[in-house]
Amino acid sequence: EAGVAQSPRYKIIEKRQSVAFWCNPISGHATLYWYQQILGQGPKLLIQFQNNGVVDDSQLPKDRFSAERLKGVDSTLKIQPAKLEDSAVYLCASSLVGNTEAFFGQGTRLTVV
Amino acid sequence: GENVEQHPSTLSVQEGDSAVIKCTYSDSASNYFPWYKQELGKRPQLIIDIRSNVGEKKDQRIAVTLNKTAKHFSLHITETQPEDSAVYFCAALEYGNKLVFGAGTILRVKS
């Protein structure tokens, strides 16, 4: 089966610029997660969708980050404006509803200079 | 919300020895506990998981144990090999399907 697809793989931007990441989950997976993984740390959950509704966005810095999941399939995560501390790998994962495995995409490595 | 703590942060073992990584969680309603392995520059991949109605699960050289009363679970790797070197993350699935990760353990297997 096809895995979770993310793009771009790498992105370098200057601070205060904006950036968007795209994720296509595994077909049929209702749950979609966006994680931020700073070098040397564990993935930190930013936002969780179930179908096209937000389940949890308590750790999303809403003054600069936004995310949407149109039609309950693909999702985009946007940062505007970016800060130096946003440099990280942004991982998208998807799963079936319930206590099942979450599958991760390759991630987008963002460098803010 | 769920808080997952993981220890140790780094672990070095000699090839052939066993490695144990421990995690504790805070939300007693959590019912699913996966372990992920992440190699440098790659995505996290599930290596084993356990559900709250089971105390232990084994898959070849890897095993996971769960103590619901104490709210901790552990990963055991026996007969370690150099290819086991990676970062290992525990996670807990809390109510609402929210998957929360530990900070990770860097495992180095010396040959």
Image (spheres, rainbow, N blue to C red):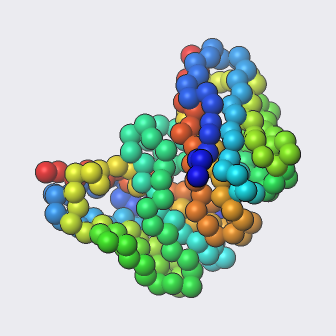
Give coordinates of residue B108: x percent, y percent.
26, 50
Q: Name the residue nearer the viewer: B3 or B38.
A: B38
Relative to A14, is A3 above or below?
below
Q: Name the residue nearer the viewer: A85 or B94.
A: B94
- Residue occupying the far front of the picture: A1
Relative to A109, is B64 above or below?
below
Q: Residue at x 38, y 68 (%)?
A: B75
Relative to A12, is A57 above or below?
below
The quadrant holding residue B53 is bottom right
Give coordinates of residue A95: x percent, y percent.
66, 58
Q: Residue at x 58, y 32 (%)?
A: A108
Give coordinates of residue A92: x percent, y percent.
63, 44
Q: Quadrant of the N terminus of chain B?
A: bottom right
**Would residue A104 appear left or right of A33 to someone viewing this image?**
left
Q: Name the residue nearer the viewer: A75 or A87.
A: A75
- Residue occupying the far left of the picture: B111
Q: Residue at x 29, y 54 (%)?
A: B84
Q: Residue at x 70, y 34 (%)?
A: A22
Q: Is residue A35 visible?
A: no
Relative to B33, is A57 above or below?
above
**Would residue B20 appear left or right of A51 to someone viewing this image?**
left
Q: Name the residue nearer the viewer: B94 or A71.
A: A71
